[in-house]
Structures are given as structure tokens and as C-alpha cells.
Image: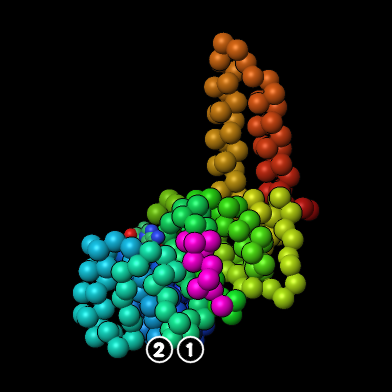
Amino acid sequence: HLSKRLQTVSDHVEPGSRLADIGSDHAYLPIHLAKNHTIEYGVVGEIAKGPLSNAISEIKKDRLLDVLHPRLADGLAAIEPGDNVNAITIAGMGGNLITHILEAGKEKLSGQEKLILQPNVGEPVVRHWLMTNGYRIFAEQILEEDGHIYEIITAKKAPQPVHYTDLELKFGPFLMKEKSPVFVEKWQEEIELLKRVIENMHQAVHEDTTKIQSIQKEIDTINEVIQVES
Ligand code: SAM
């Protein structure tokens, strides 16, 4: 009964992983993985007491307290040295918060772990943090559920620095190559939104032509990216 979004996140967790799920809320993701025997060890991190106590009761219901370790903590502070975590999931938050959690918890990252990130918004900020901190994105997914479009980014520390172009940071290096129907839909919606912004600006008393031109340029860029080559 896992949502399609969390199912897609969980698909990236390799069997035998030692997982930390940060901002776990009800702990549905780690519970699903523990029940499947994909993970034998999981840290369930939550900053808020309410969600943590929900997580604890869900974990108890499934008798998984020997596998899943719920901890009240801010971000990666939930991870302790003996955990030997090699996979971290952070899902269902804004890209700024995900980036903040990674930045604030840097000393907890060994560089061996796979990061599986699902920002609800602000994906470019996450990609930028990954690039700046020496990570390589090695898979991306985009999916639609209940009228929302979600992106999932997985990354691992790279031996060599990786450079992503501004276009790749904005659209996603894999997603912009793949150009799936959901990807095209996401960016068509963005174009419609930007067109409405321009229309509204035309109605303003003092029309800001420079701003309108820059938004038009953004629309042109999106159109070029989503255009399917024949
Ligand atoms: N990860 C689950 C999912 O994708 O369905 C739950 C997402 S829920 C919207 C976000 C959760 O992150 C909330 O329960 C919130 O309390 C928690 N959270 C927010 N900031 C956090 C932080 N700095 N450290 C740990 N948890 C945090």
C-alpha cells in the first residue's frame, strides 16, 4: 500500500543496505523495506515528536524494533558511527530543506553512501549541492501521482569532480535526455505558468520589457529542451 512515489524511492535501495531514512514521519518507507527484507538495519530519523511517536507505533505493530531504530534528531544527527549506513533516503520535503540537511550534516557522510533524494520542489538546488560537493547523479526518475509530479535523484560520491551545465541542473541530466511524457508535461505546465506571468505583466502600468524578455527566453529554453527530435 506504499504510494507510487515512496515505492519508486524504495526501488533505489539495494538489498542488504543499511539505511537512514531522514524525515521519516510515519516510517512507511523503512517499514516497507524491512518487511521485504531489503534492509536488515534502518535508522528512522525524525525532528518532530508527533511523527516520531507515530513511527514508533507503526514499527511496533510490525514487530520491527530489532531492525528499525527510531531516533528524535535534526537531520543527519540521527546517524551514529556504529550504524555504518550506506544508503540515505530523504523524501517528501522541499529541495532547500534537503540541501540544508545534507549541508548541516556533512561530517556524518562517509562518502560511501548512496543518496536517494526526492524533493517536492526545488530540484535544481539539490543537484547544485550534489555537484558542488563532489557527487555524481547516476539515476533520475520522474513520476506523477494524484496530480503531483515528483522527481527522484540518486547520487554517489564521485572519484573525479563532475560538472553539470545550467540546463542539466535545472532539468536533470538524465530526465532531459529521456524526455518522458511526464517530464514533457511538467515543463509544458511551467510554460503555461510563465505565459500567464507575461500576460499579467503586459497589463501593468509600467511594462518591464527586460523582465518580459527574460521570461520569454526561459520559455524558449524549455521549448528547446522538451522538443522531441525527429
Ligand atoms: N519522508 C516521508 C515521505 O516522503 O512520505 C515523510 C515526509 S514529511 C512531509 C516530512 C517530514 O520531515 C516531517 O515528518 C518532518 O517532521 C520531518 N523533518 C523536517 N525537517 C527535518 C529535519 N531537519 N530532520 C529530520 N526530520 C525533519
Amino acid type indicated by mark 2: Glu
The quarter in which the N terminus is drawn is bottom left
* Res 32 quadrant in image: bottom left
Q: Residue 133's image quarter?
A: bottom right
Q: Residues within 10 Å of mark 2 (few under 14, many from 20)?
A: some
Tell whether label 1 touches label 2 (CB within 8 Å).
Answer: yes
Label drawn at residue 138: none
Q: Is residue 224 above or below residue 200?
A: below
The numbered mark at residue 40 is 2
Which mark is on residue 16? 1
Could one spot residue 31 in this view of the protein? Answer: yes
In the rendered view, tell whether residue 60 sits above or below residue 162. below
State the image coordinates of residue 222 (x, y, percent, origin top left).
67, 43
Q: Secondary structure at mark 1?
A: loop
| Amino acid type, callout 1 | Gly
Element marked by disc 2: strand
Mark 1 CB in 8 Å range of ligand 1?
no
